[in-house]
Image (cartoon, rainbow, N blue to C red):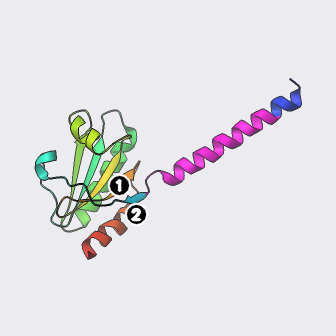
Amino acid sequence: MTPLAVIAILVGIIALATALGLIWKAQNGRVRTSRGDETIRGVDVAAELGATATLLQFSSEVCAPCVSTHRVLDSLAAETAGVAHVEVDIVKHPDLVARFNILQTPTTLVLDNRGVVRARIGGAARPDSVRQELARIAAA
C-alpha cells in the first residue's frame, strides 16, 4: 500500500469517527416524547410519585454521568412544585429495565401525575430541556 493510500484511509477513519461522535453528542441527553402507552405506579419503584410529574432516573453504581444527572434532576425537582425525582438502580430492578428497554445509564423517564411515561432522556439530562418538558406536562 502506498503512503498516500494509508494517509487517505486514516483521514477517512478520523472523519467517520468525528461524524459519529457529533451525532452521538447531539442525541445524548435529548428529550424524546413518548406515545404515552406505558404507566408506572409508585409501588413499581417503591416511591411516591410527584403530584404534577416524576423524573424517574435509571442509574448504576459504576455510571459517572449518573451522579451529575442526579444533581440536575434533584435541583429541578426541588425548584418545581409537585415534581418528584426518583432514582432506580438497574441492578435492583431488572424487571423495569427490561420493561422499558433501558439500554444505557443514565436514562430518565418523565412521568405525568398518573405515572404515564410522557418522555424519555437517554444520557445526561439537559436542565433546560427537562424544564420545557415539565412545563409541557404541567400545561396539559
Disc 1 to disc 2: CB gap under 8 Å: no
Which mark identifies residue 83?
Answer: none
Q: Quadrant of the C terminus?
A: bottom left
- As drawn, the residue found furthest toward the top would be 1
Query: Disc 2 residue type?
Result: Ser
* Residue 102 rendering spot, x and y as whole percentages: 33, 42
The image quarter containing residue 53 is: bottom left
* Residue 110 rendering spot, x and y as whole percentages: 29, 58
- On screen, residue 15 versus residue 32, left or right, reads right
Q: Residues within 10 Å of mark 1 (few under 14, many from 20)?
A: many
Q: Main secondary structure of the magenta part?
A: helix
- On screen, residue 52 versus residue 5, left or right, reads left
Residue span colored magenta: 8-30
**For mark 2, what is the residue?**
129
**Residue at the location (36% across, 41% down)?**
105
Q: Please, is residue 41 above or below residue 83 in the view?
A: above
CA gap, disc 1 and disc 2: 11 Å
Query: Disc 1 residue type?
Result: Arg
Judged from the image, the secondary structure of the residue bearing numbered disc 1 is strand
Judged from the image, the secondary structure of the residue bearing numbered disc 2 is helix
* Residue 83 rendering spot, x and y as whole percentages: 21, 63
* Residue 24 rendering spot, x and y as whole percentages: 53, 47
Q: Quadrant of the N terminus?
A: top right
Compare marks 1 and 2 and give the one earlier in the sequence. 1
